[in-house]
Amino acid sequence: GTLVNFRCVRDRVSMLARYALAPQLRTLRQANVRGGRSALASNLGATSWARLSRRLVVGESNRELNPMSFFASSSWGCSRSSSRFISSASFRSSCSSVSSSCAAPSSTPSSPCPAARAAGSTETLREKVRGDITWLRAQVAAFPGADRCDVADATMPPASWYTSESFLALEQLANFRRNWLAVGRASAVQEPGSFLSGEVAQVPWLVVRDHAGELRAFVNVCRHRAAAVVTQSTGRIAEHERFRCPYHGWEYSSNGALAKAPRIGGVRQFRVRDMGLVELPVRVKGPLLMLSLVPAPLASSSSSSSSLSSSVSRRRRAHRAQTVPGSADDLSPSGGGAESTATGKAGEQRADDASLLSDESLESESGWLPDDSALSTVLEAMAKEGFSTTLRPVHQVDYRLECNWKVFASNYLDGGYHVPELHKGLSTALELDTYSIQVDRCFSIQRCAGGAPAEGDVPGRVSGQAFYAYVHPNLMINRYGPWMDVNTVWPTGPNSCVVRFEYFLEHDSTLSPETIKKSLAASHQVQIEDVDISESVQRGLRSGMYIPGRYPPNVEHADYAFHSQLKRELEAELNHVV
């Protein structure tokens, strides 16, 4: 292209950089697509590129970008020669390269807890939040919340809550890492040695029933070089087996204690008892495994931790006492693992693993652990209303949606507002005039009487009373007729999520296999309708044209409570990050 004098067109470059280059670089940074910077960097040079990137990051945080403050003080366009000239065609080509490289990265959710891995770079979540903290504070403050505004006066959160990578990073810290999360079925870890693994909010986790019959959870990260120790999503290890890291062969007993560290001899002050897998709190609530991502060791430094951290410490001392080094490699006394076995103990304790009222927890309900009273209240209410408390799992399916996870949650929480329009079949099976909503800080319950079955629907599928419960942040439990389905929604990116549906039937249900199949097909049709509308909403949020709406106070107050609790946790995390 034609070479033009850089000094003569500085003002034009300023306008181009403000309206063309800067937005693309912001998109590039938020999507964390590093490959797209190569063309631009080749023109700028490594040093100039780094300086420009830092300025753009700072500018994005303040939402006031002044690219000329960089261009005026740099040797941009002169890094490879003494000439003060640059090809305008090359500059336009660089901008095009950046723009075309901003496709959102894909992400594969993990199992059995689907989708816990959000799309993003290798930056830590906290670094992402710190980089945009001024902007994030403004976006959180843009929503008033129930502590400051009644639902009748409130507007909905801005679109940025649903489209920003840095906002999702904040949610992972505030809403997912600091709450109890349902990560699987309790029946999956009923037998000694059985385990589940997955990833939530960039934390790989492992839940195992150890060979002494105790339920445990760990960070699934080897204490040597941080590789995942367990790569299967589910399985079982025999009494003589251990979890073996595929990288360097470090082995851990089912109780998390380090049992073997090849070629570790000669390392000074290597304390075996301190090198076990990092433990996480886990408990059984009804048919669900509930996991907290707050590591137990961190709790001991909290002034409020007392009895629970003491119980964890006692439990640790008990299993560490079994791991006295016998050699440089095998760290158990016998060379065959450090577990003590109580045959049949787990089976005896977990015989009623599908009971809604089962509760296998650590010793204390107070201290540093998140509050789980919301789920307990929901399960107790379900039992009091006559629903059977014993259930058996029958089906599991995942739905992958091109929408933010909160879009799906809000669709669930709109008090049946969308049912007459969106679910024609379901609306005739419910007496919507009887709809009632109970709202609390961290849960809500929607109730509705069942009506006559719709044409083509399965008789009795929605009979008696329908019971729809939401438990913060991402758990939904639905009871209708002999059925219960449990939904968990997991973000895979700011514009995508995956929803897991787990279906249960009452133990004494006499439904035939054909009826079960038809019932699941009817439920699937409802989910497809919800998927389609949720993805339509996300397209509107991404358009840049959405002006936050209002809540009809008689039907969407549960959704308002959901957003308000998110805001409380987001504000607390922003204060904590600083």
Image: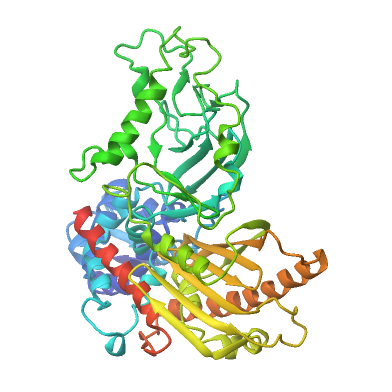
Q: Which of 67 and 151 is in front in this view?
A: 151
Asked if residue 166 can be seen in this view, the reply is yes
Q: Establish if 400 lies above or below 289.
A: below
Q: Nearer the viewer, residue 448 or 47?
A: 448
User: How many numbered circles are shown?
Assistant: 0
Of residues 548 and 450, the one nearer the viewer is 450
Q: Which residue is depicted at the point 71% across and 75% down?
A: 522
Residue 19 image position (x, y, % from top left): 32, 74
Q: In this view, does 208 lie above or below 20?
A: above
Where is residue 544, by image quadrant? bottom left
> In the picture provided, is 458 more to the left or to the right than 300?
right
Residue at image x 57%, y 77%?
A: 466
Looking at the image, what colour scheme do you see?
A: rainbow
x and y, in percent, of residue 199 in the image: 49, 47
Residue 94 seen from this side: no
Quadrant in the picture for the C terminus:
bottom left
Q: Position of residue 273 (x, y in %)?
A: 36, 21
Which residue lies at the image location 35% right of the left edge and 12% below the top edge? 267
User: For residue 29, which quarter of the picture?
Assistant: bottom left
Residue 494: image location, x then y, percent:
44, 65
Q: Is residue 279 left or right of residue 236?
A: left
25 left or right of 99 in image: left
Q: In which quarter of the image is the N terminus?
A: bottom left
Residue found 40% across the figure and 84% down from its top: 546
Q: Residue furthest bottom?
A: 433
